[in-house]
Image (cartoon, helix red, strand yellow):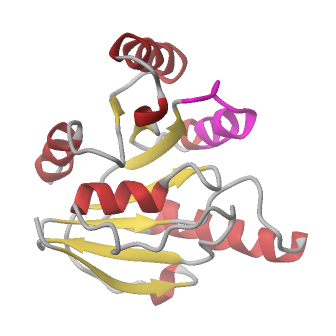
Amino acid sequence: MQAKFIQSAEKLSQCPQFNLPEFPLLGRSNVGKSSFINGIANNKKLAKTSNTPGKTRLINLFNFSDKFIIADLPGYGYAKVSKEVQNQWQKNLEEYLLKREDIKCLVQLVDGRHEIQKNDYQMREWVSAYNLPIITVITKTDCISSHNKIAQAVAHVKREFGGEVYPFSANNNRYNDKILEFFTRAR
């Protein structure tokens, strides 16, 4: 699948219309949203990755073979910016998530190495309050020691959040087919 970066936008009014299914990525800072995009695209240089939390500050739009769009959003949680800037991000992201017509499903990423965090639960509560469609992707499964522990992590997230849950590894493509199948069938 050919994937390319389209543009960055600060707010909804700056996002172009694609008339394609769109999938925004929600997750804590440094959960692996950019690595997820790179892994799905099979291109390690498509989305910029960083070890420093809070580097993504805009809505970054990526086109996957004119079949769907992935939106990399700023992470919730840690970011070295003022409260005023954080409040503006929240306002812009809420407008985007609630009013963007091409969004088919939100994708919440959680780090498989750790327990689900308080802000992950808070995000899920916000999504549920607006009755938005959502799936969960468990990232960093390459850092989990066994297939059994990955299965346990998937079962735990499924119990906590319900819905569809997909494991993901940025270091190999073994989980990509099921995730890509979900994205391409959501028309």
Place residue 123 in its image quadrant: top right
Vertical relation: 20 (above or below) 154: below
Judge left or right: residue 20 versus residue 119: left
- Magenta segment includes 34: no
Give how far across and how far down residue 148 sits, in percent. Answer: 37, 10
Task: Residue 96: give x, y in percent of width and height.
Answer: 51, 69
* Residue at image coords 60%, 66%: 74
The magenta segment: 113-126
**Residue extending furthest toward the front:** 145
Q: Is 117 included in the stretch rendered in magenta?
A: yes
The percent position of residue 3, horizontal first and vertical second, equals 20, 72
Q: Main secondary structure of the magenta part?
A: helix
- Residue 80 quadrant: bottom right
Which residue lies at the image location 38% right of the left edge and 54% below the top edge?
A: 36
- Position above or below: 81 against 110: below
Which quarter of the rendered picture does the N terminus lie within? bottom left
Q: What residue occupies the far right of the structure in this picture?
A: 83
Number of marks in the rendered image? 0
The vertical placement of 74 against 60, above or below, is above
Residue at x 89%, y 69% (from the top left corner): 83
Which of 131/27 is in front? 27
Q: In which quarter of the view is residue 71 placed?
A: bottom left
Who is closer to the viewer here, 80 or 102? 80
Pick the front one: 151 or 45: 45
For the residue pair 61 and 106, the one nearer the viewer reads as 61
The location of residue 125, given as percent across then percent down, is 63, 35
State which quarter of the image contains the C terminus. bottom left
Q: Residue at x 63, y 50 (%)?
A: 28
